[in-house]
Image: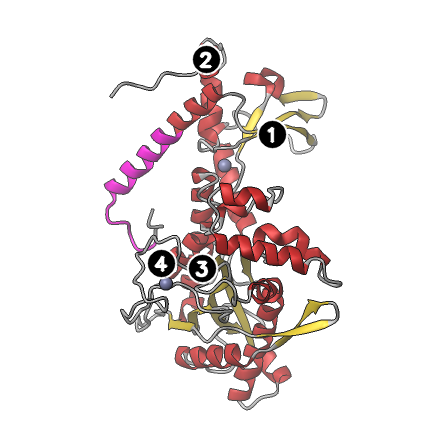
Amino acid sequence: MSAPALDPWTRESLIARASDPKRERWLEQVRRTGACRHPIRLRGVVRRGDEVVYSTADEPDRALMVRCGNRREACCPSCAHEYRGDMWQLVYAGLAGGRKGVPESVAGHPQVFATLTAPSFGPVHTIRDDGRPCRCGRRHDDGDPELGSAIDPTSYDYEGAVLWNWHAPALWNRFVIELGRVLAADAGLSEREWRQLVRVAYAKVAEFQARGLVHSHIAVRLDGAEDRAMPPGVPVSPGELCDAIREAAAGVRLDGDAGDGETVELRFGEQLDTRVLAGDDDSGELSAGKVAGYVAKYSCKSSHEQITSRDAEPDSWRDKGVPEHLIEMAAAALRLSERAGLRRIARWVHMLGFRGHFVTKSRGYSTTLGELRAARAAYRAEQNEPADEPEDDSIPVVAVWEYVGSGYLNPGDVLLAAGVEASLRAGREALLDLRRGPPADEPPW
Ligand SMILES: [Zn+2]
Ligand SMILES: [Zn+2]
């Protein structure tokens, strides 16, 4: 197979970079961003007192590249990889304890991994667990683009589905309150008494399903009210926690604004999955490493990748191959945004009405993404620039940064960065091979 001919711009920009006296430093920058697909280019100066200790004036293209930080695999594999690793660390620390500042004892607290779903807004094409054909009479393959779309688009409640996404964050908040209520009642205590003994800690990740509705995957843990190192002040078995989650999810209701003075009653779907986590005695159904892996994977996935760009016009979505079902939902979101009280949905059409965070956690569940990033930044700074003289802390260091642009400057640079990405990935895979299989407390990628 012969290599495809390069277009003139690519060829010229490749030659320009090859003859750039700062090409090695440019490649070093690309490596330091992990071969990010759309690095942010910054211009700036760092001063310690009157002394300039760093300036981008000396850098290739007079700019410093930093990661785009996008968590979506399809946008930037490298940044998604890093995000996934951080999520894994965060959730694993919350489940297993004994790392990242989370006390070891939390591993013995009641812990459950649960999935809360949206209700049905009309039959959609699915693969059934019991092996029966889809309601349309056919059997669908795994990658069938029809999966998740309405069997009868004329009767499907697209607006109801968008309203559900719109109110999902409030419904979730209701659920957390309801869970406390159920657990308090189980213990024969008032909610107030119960809250003085127990705190519900959780990490939650939202996942878009093929049908355009948001699911929540949650790791729930019960701690002592005052100190997360202590077990909950009311003994609760993991099985009882599962039952309470089911009861709370089934019972929670929310009257959501449907616009023009109308309300809509919101609830969770009947499909609900709860699984006990293996604690100290390893008796649970799921290991901490596995759950951390699930959450980390969901956090980087998005099944409606093509319509997440805020500025895109719905008309152009069809050309990009966005499934008709999701286009219908977006159209419903636009219709809803014309109703009094729902105008703000217009800003969330690209999210099919979902305005929540993809990843949330309660205070005290684990470490934070910010702490993980700060630790990594400090580690990298140490690796890259060993301080050869002790710094004088009394002189203030001031950095001034200015945004120049994002992405690479030309197709030649894109090609070179892709080469760096491939070599970094090969290095990572070789490392995984070396320690196959990955030890239980390491991310499985
Ligand atoms: Zn990136
Ligand atoms: Zn079907």
| Residue ID for mark 4 | 289
Residue 168: x percent and y percent? Answer: 58, 65
Q: Nearer the viewer, mark 4 or mark 3?
A: 3
**Does the magenta portion include 325?**
no
Q: Residues within 10 Å of mark 4 (few under 14, many from 20)?
A: many
| Residue ID for mark 3 | 149
Marks 4 and 3, how far apart at CA: 33 Å
Report the disc number at residue 8.
2
Q: Nearer the viewer, mark 4 or mark 2?
A: 2
**Marks 4 and 2, the one that precedes in the sequence:** 2
| Residue ID for mark 1 | 391
Residue at disc 4, CB closer than 8 Å to ligand 1: no
Q: Nearer the viewer, mark 2 or mark 1?
A: 2
Magenta residues: mostly which secondary structure? Answer: helix
Residue 30: x percent and y percent? Answer: 47, 26
SS at badge 2:
helix
Rendered position, 59 above or below 395 = above
Q: How is the image coloured?
A: secondary structure
